[in-house]
């Protein structure tokens, strides 16, 4: 239905791409917008008075406003452009370190992406706080009972993935909000929406988190760009993760004063072409409509799951929500890398390994998993090709 929007497939019609959770292919208008900047508009942002420089500065401001509306954020100044979810999480972790002290606690789940584990591990080394990890149940959901028991007056941050990049489960945000609301001092609640933003309509006014991060390349935009949204009281507490040009109000030899939001958290020259391409991706999704995107994802994922369940020896990890577009599997006899290599030889692109979630796989005693993830260019017809290839891969192992 949407496949013709993506030039990649006109050059490689033989490829079945099922690795969108790692990175998405790019629609034509994103590619053209990046090229247009380089060919017609290339100029520095926020540093020049000539026409091209003013136009580039204005274009970035327009994309910020577009993102503000797209994600229904309360304030435009709360939209911070970063290099992606990883930088955004580092900014959060290191930015609030000065507000924490020994004995404070940060709660994560064992299924978090490494980008939502390692920055916190590094941060607590400097402030004496500690990390508590919540286990995941057999269905992939975090253990809400354990979360409730772990919350206390010492809890300062709860940081979780809105959609698991392994299980494809959708976080029960409402139930978590109820648990957090019972705390005398409500902790900050952060969401990693890297695997949600491409498939689900998100309203930051109603989601109830204090910060949300995402990467553009997982939602049909360029690599090396993403955003951090945070409530103003949180953002104003963050110590800048990077300092330098563009984020200052005044620099003198004795001291420096910082600019207001959002510039205070956007040091250096921006990834102008990336931000413009990100804007084109948001416009593309907005034109389709995120409800239509969710419906498409659910239709394709439902058929893919049914096909995978018919493959002998395959186990689906957790209970993936169809709107996530993610299904991870393991096999009782065959290593996921071997299956992925066989599929690659058939021009079927999937992800195999720890999925940047080594603690989760260790907890399940799994060497890795094979992840199938869908995008707008996939259709229900892809399921039959994937099932046939997996069955063929298993013949040497005694599966008919």
Image (cartoon, helix red, strand yellow):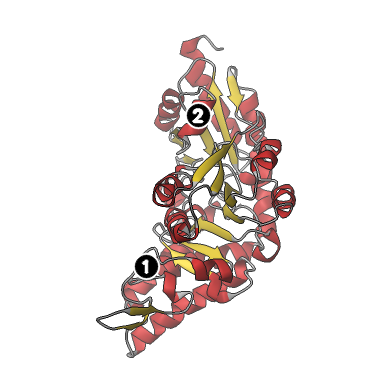
Residue ID at (49%, 60%): 99
The disc at residue 10 is none
Please determine whether, in this image, residue 30 is positioned above or below residue 104: below
- Within 10 Å of disc 1 (Cα), the crowding (few <14, some 14-19, many 20+) is some
Residue ID at (51%, 71%): 236
**Total number of numbered labels?**
2
Q: Can residue 374 be seen? A: no
Which secondary structure, mark 1? loop
Circle 2 or circle 1, nearest the eye: 2
Q: Position of residue 124 (x, y in %)?
A: 44, 48
The front one of 388 and 95 is 95
Which secondary structure, mark 2? helix
Please determine whether, in this image, residue 344 is positioned above or below residue 44: above
**Quadrant of residue 169 within the rendered picture:** top right
Left or right of residue 176, residue 277 in this image: left
Left or right of residue 183, residue 273 in this image: left
Q: Position of residue 153 (x, y in %)?
A: 64, 50
Q: How far apart are the two marked residues, 2 and 1, measured between alpha carbons?
A: 35 Å
Q: Which residue is mark 1?
A: 271
Please determine whether, in this image, residue 103 is positioned above or below residue 310: below
Q: Earlier in the sequence, mark 2 or mark 1?
A: 1
Q: Which residue is mark 2?
A: 361
Q: Position of residue 49 (x, y in %)?
A: 33, 90
């Amino acid at each position: 239905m949407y496949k013709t929007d993506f030039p990649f497939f006109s050059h490689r019609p033989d490829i079945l791409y099922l690795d969108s959770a790692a990175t998405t292919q790019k629609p034509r208008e994103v590619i053209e917008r990046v090229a247009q900047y380089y060919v017609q508009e290339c100029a520095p942002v926020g540093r020049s008075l000539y026409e091209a420089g003013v136009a580039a500065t204005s274009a970035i401001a327009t994309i910020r406003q577009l993102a503000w509306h797209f994600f229904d954020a309360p304030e435009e100044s709360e939209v911070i452009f970063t290099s992606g979810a990883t930088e955004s999480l580092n900014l959060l972790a290191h930015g609030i370190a000065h507000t924490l002290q020994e004995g404070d606690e940060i709660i994560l789940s064992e299924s978090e992406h490494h980008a939502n584990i390692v920055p916190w591990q590094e941060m607590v080394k400097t402030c004496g706080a500690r990390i508590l990890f919540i286990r995941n149940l057999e269905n992939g959901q975090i253990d809400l009972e354990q979360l409730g028991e772990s919350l206390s007056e010492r809890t300062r941050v709860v940081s979780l993935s809105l959609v698991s990049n392994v299980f494809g489960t959708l976080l029960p945000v409402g139930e978590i909000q109820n648990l957090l609301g019972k705390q005398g001092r409500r902790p900050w609640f952060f969401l990693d929406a890297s695997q949600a933003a491409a498939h689900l309509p998100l309203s930051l006014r109603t989601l109830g988190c204090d910060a949300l991060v995402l990467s553009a390349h997982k939602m049909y935009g360029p690599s090396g760009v993403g955003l951090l949204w945070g409530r103003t009281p949180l953002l104003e507490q963050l110590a800048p993760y990077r300092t330098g040009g563009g984020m200052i109000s005044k620099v003198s030899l004795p001291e420096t004063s910082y600019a207001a939001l959002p510039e205070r958290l956007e040091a250096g020259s921006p990834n102008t072409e990336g931000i413009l391409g990100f804007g084109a991706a948001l416009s593309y999704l907005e034109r389709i409509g995120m409800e239509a995107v969710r419906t498409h994802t659910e239709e394709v994922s439902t058929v893919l799951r049914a096909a995978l369940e018919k493959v002998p020896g395959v186990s689906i990890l957790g209970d993936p929500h169809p709107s996530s577009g993610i299904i991870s599997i393991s096999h009782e006899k065959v290593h996921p890398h071997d299956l992925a290599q066989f599929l690659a030889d058939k021009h079927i692109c999937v992800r195999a390994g720890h999925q940047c979630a080594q603690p989760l796989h260790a907890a399940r005693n799994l060497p890795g998993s094979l992840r199938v993830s869908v995008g707008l260019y996939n259709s229900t017809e892809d399921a039959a090709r994937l099932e046939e290839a997996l069955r063929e891969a298993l013949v040497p192992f005694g599966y008919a």
